[in-house]
Image (cartoon, grey):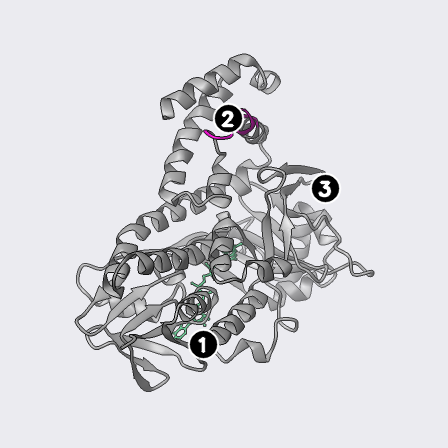
Amino acid sequence: MQPKVAIVGAGLVGSLLATQLSQRGHQVTLYERSSDMRAKGFIGGRSINLALSTRGLKALSLAGLEKAALEMALPMKSRMMHNRQGALTEQAYGAEDQAINSISRSGLNIMLLDAAERAGARLMFNAPCSGIDLQSGEMSLGGESVKADIVIGADGAFSALRNSLMKRQRFNYQQRFLEHGYKELRIPPAHDGSHQLSNQSLHIWPREQFMLIALPNLDGSFTCTLFMAFEGEQNSFDSIPDAETAEQFFKQHFADALQLMPTFKNDWDDNPTSPLVTVRCDPWSYQASDTQTLLIGDASHAIVPFYGQGMNSGFEDTTLLIEALEKNSDWKQAIQAFDQERYIDANAIADLALRNYIEMRDQVADPDFLLRKKMAARFQKLEPQRFIPMYSQVTFSHLPYRKALAGAHAQDQLFEQLLKRPNIHQEWESTEVDKQFRTWLDQQD
Ligand SMILES: Cc1cc2nc3c(=O)[nH]c(=O)nc-3n(C[C@H](O)[C@H](O)[C@H](O)COP(=O)(O)OP(=O)(O)OC[C@H]3O[C@@H](n4cnc5c(N)ncnc54)[C@H](O)[C@@H]3O)c2cc1C
């Protein structure tokens, strides 16, 4: 008899996994604590967007959904830095044909819920899970008791399923809040409906201790996010008591963006200031005689958003779990194989994401950093088979994150050495620099 699969959480990862499993003939029920978001539609709500890239696209393509997702997305080929005077510097993310894709979170979620239903999954809304009996597989869902053979917790960073696993002995768990939080703001479309900034870039206003970013939406607007410390006498959310002070702060630091934000004060008051958390835990699964429980997506590895990899890594989880099910004879073996390997990569992308925060807010405006990016692009052209820039390893490849993290350390050493060369800013295209690069490359093989 087919095992009964219950997925808790119909967010991005849960609904994609439900689709993939149902398409492969599994009997899946998806339980979500909220009501069906499709009733409201995504047009009316606040538009929050995400950067979808190679790892996420592969998972969507396995479900036959890549094309539909890309049709709702805007490709961003570059980061566009805005300095205090409003001058712009553009930097390509990768090769000419590479881009990350700005996509509406709710639009994508709605598409995935429809796909899960089409594939045959049963969708149950208003079903909040308050925990599971790990031995019997019995869950409490909105007061009702439901039993399944396979229970997958895709219930996000504050997972109820994970809370049940935490009651076991030898469950490792760490939750760490960043001292910085975020607030979303909005740049509306121009009167003719067009975008007021280039819609082919992710815009960044790096200001060392804080930063503003903006991603384009299909309707001509941009969703902006201010990342800043919660506490501190200045440059912190605590130091800005009201929208009036916030406007003064923006005039000082983000004047070109503020000009494009007619609803700034209302947005400042209406939108919450939210925390950013990194969650690491292991093991992600529990095997009992009657039932298997597994965590996936943010429930097992919530990360800060600075590499744009939270959803992408959660989608990659689904690809790897499906592959494990194809390679192994039963769920138990597949879950064990997935769990043993994947948490190492999840820890690596958590580290990379934290590291990228410093890079985005402090370094993207630094001449040494800009030179480093130019040299990396040049090295890739010289040795395309042997050198992939760090950002591309994470964003445009399927390389396990642990390898990308090791590569990051090795590339740091190369660039630190090169930047010590006198006149490197003038001579970065010289044969001496190429020679030093090739010597380093040979040492990596
Ligand atoms: C500011 C910000 C920007 C980001 N930008 C990016 C980006 O550009 N690219 C990227 O890849 N990632 C990004 N992320 C990360 C991304 O949002 C998450 O990694 C992704 O949403 C995780 O998906 P999930 O399905 O695992 O969890 P969630 O999206 O949190 O979904 C969990 C679902 O479970 C439901 N649920 C929760 N508890 C229960 C319960 N007890 N019972 C039943 N249902 C429950 C919730 O209602 C929800 O529907 C960003 C995150 C933030 C905060």
| In this picture, residue 157 sits left or right of residue 291 | right
Residue topped by disc 2:
383
Identify residue for label 3: 86
Identity of the amino acid at label 2? Glu
Give the mark, 2 or 3, whose residue is nearer the N terminus. Answer: 3
What separation in Å lies between label 1 and label 3 (alpha carbons)? 51 Å
Residue drawn at (44%, 64%) of the image: 13
Under mark 1, the amino acid is: Gly
Looking at the image, residue 175 sits to the left or right of residue 263; the answer is left
Q: Is residue 210 left or right of residue 4?
A: right
Categorize mark 1 by other alpha carbons within 10 Å: few (<14), some (14-19), many (20+): some
Q: Is mark 1 within 8 Å of ligand 1?
A: no
Instruction: Identify the secondary structure beneath mark 3.
Output: loop
Residue 407 x/y as whole percent:
40, 34
Labels 1 and 3: the sequence-earlier one? 3
Q: Distance between the Cα atoms at labels 2 and 3?
A: 36 Å
First along the sequence among labels 1 and 2: 1
Q: Which mark is residue 120?
A: 1
Does the magenta-highlighted stretch encompass residue 371? no
- In the rendered image, the quadrant that contains the C terminus is top left
| Front residue of this view, candidates 281 and 323 | 323
User: How far across and down, in percent of the image, does residue 441 sit?
Assistant: 42, 23
The span picked out in magenta is 378-386
Please check the rendered image and state whether residue 383 is part of the magenta-colored stretch, yes or no: yes
Element carrying mark 2: loop
Res 291 quadrant in image: bottom left
Q: Residue furthest right?
A: 192
Mark 2 crowd level (few <14, some 14–19, many ≥20, 10 Å Cα): few
Q: Could you tell me the amino acid type at mark 3?
A: Gly
Which one is in front in this view, the residue at disc 1 or the one at disc 2? Answer: 1
- Rendered location of residue 308, percent (x, y): 51, 51
